[in-house]
Image: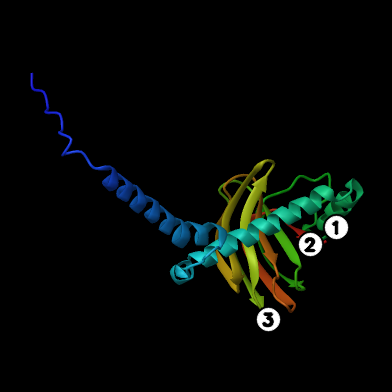
């Protein structure tokens, strides 16, 4: 049976070498933290490297959208029950469908092929959310664009305790493509005007869904 030789004391790294290796590892980790992790996750960029690599903008988008979501959640939780019911009623009254396609409360939603266009005006600081009722696997072609400025947006879906973000951005002038529902539920867009002047957001959709529901700024 072959036994490996035990290393001699001379073969082992010295305390100084171990300290130097540890210091190098700590310095490398710190450099990655400062130049990559902090800019990309928290928009903190003390060296300017994150901005040059395009990571700081990513962090700013994450931070701003997270802040908006937290404030909206806090506002909804702190609102009286009567106010929340009033807000819901207002959203339902904002259905963007023609009278020919309007449904009564007793009529179940019918997924059908639709093509619609709507324009929303957002004052500075205001937001609006437009959602399509869709079935899993349903595909809707969409295009939206902003006149007189840009917006922050989040294209997402939700149902019950399930939610999914398909795309998001900050300072965007528009987007287009195909929205495919990952599950049965409401799928659509959240836009907020962070500029200093009013903007107009125009949305065009074409595909199988029931109705467009709106949640306006309150």
Q: CA distance from mark 3 to mark 2?
A: 20 Å
**Which one is in front in this view, the residue at disc 1 or the one at disc 3?**
3
Q: Which residue is pictured at 71% across the width and 75% down the height? A: 200
Marked residue nearer the N-terminal end (1 or 2): 1
Q: CA distance from mark 1 to mark 2?
A: 8 Å
Q: Which residue is pictured at 45% across the width and 60% down the height? A: 36
Dot 3 alpha-carbon crowd within 10 angstroms: few under 14, some 14 to 19, many 20 or more: few
Tag 1 near tag 2, CB within 8 Å: yes
- Name the residue beneath numbered marker 3: 148
From the viewer's perspective, is 183 left or right of 215? left
Q: Nearer the viewer, residue 198 or 95?
A: 198
Tag 1 near tag 3, CB within 8 Å: no
Marked residue nearer the N-terminal end (1 or 3): 1
Element under disc 3: loop
Dot 1 alpha-carbon crowd within 10 angstroms: few under 14, some 14 to 19, many 20 or more: some
Q: Nearer the viewer, residue 39 or 101?
A: 39
Q: Position of residue 107 (x, y in %)?
A: 80, 46
Quadrant of the image occupied by residue 198: bottom right
Q: Nearer the viewer, residue 112 or 202?
A: 202
Q: Which residue is pictured at 80% across the width and 47% down the height? A: 77
Residue 74 visible from this viewpoint:
yes
Element under disc 2: strand
Q: Position of residue 99 (x, y in %)?
A: 82, 62
Q: Position of residue 158 (x, y in %)?
A: 66, 48
- Name the residue beneath numbered marker 2: 216
Q: Which residue, as the protein is rendered here, is positioned at the far top?
A: 1
Quadrant of the image occupied by residue 112: bottom right
Disc on res. 90: 1
């Amino acid at each position: 049976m072959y036994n490996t030789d035990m290393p001699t004391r001379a073969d082992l790294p010295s305390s100084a070498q171990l300290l130097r290796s540890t210091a190098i590892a700590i310095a490398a980790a710190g450099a990655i933290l400062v130049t990559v992790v902090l800019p990309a996750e928290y928009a903190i960029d003390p060296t300017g490297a994150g901005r040059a690599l395009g990571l700081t903008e990513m962090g700013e988008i994450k931070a701003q959208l997270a802040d908006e979501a937290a404030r909206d959640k806090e506002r909804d939780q702190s609102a009286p029950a009567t106010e929340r019911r009033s807000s819901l009623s207002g959203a339902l009254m904002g259905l963007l469908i023609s009278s020919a396609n309007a449904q009564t409360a007793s009529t179940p939603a019918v997924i059908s092929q639709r093509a619609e266009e709507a324009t929303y005006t957002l004052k500075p600081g205001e937001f609006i959310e437009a959602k399509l009722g869709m079935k899993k696997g349903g595909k809707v072609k969409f295009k939206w664009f902003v006149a007189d400025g840009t917006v922050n947006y989040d294209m997402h879906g939700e149902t019950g305790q399930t939610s999914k973000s398909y795309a998001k951005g900050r300072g965007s002038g528009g987007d287009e493509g195909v929205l495919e529902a990952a599950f049965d539920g409401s799928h659509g867009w959240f836009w907020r005007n962070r500029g200093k002047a009013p903007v107009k957001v125009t949305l065009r959709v074409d595909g199988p869904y029931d109705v467009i529901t709106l949640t306006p700024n309150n």
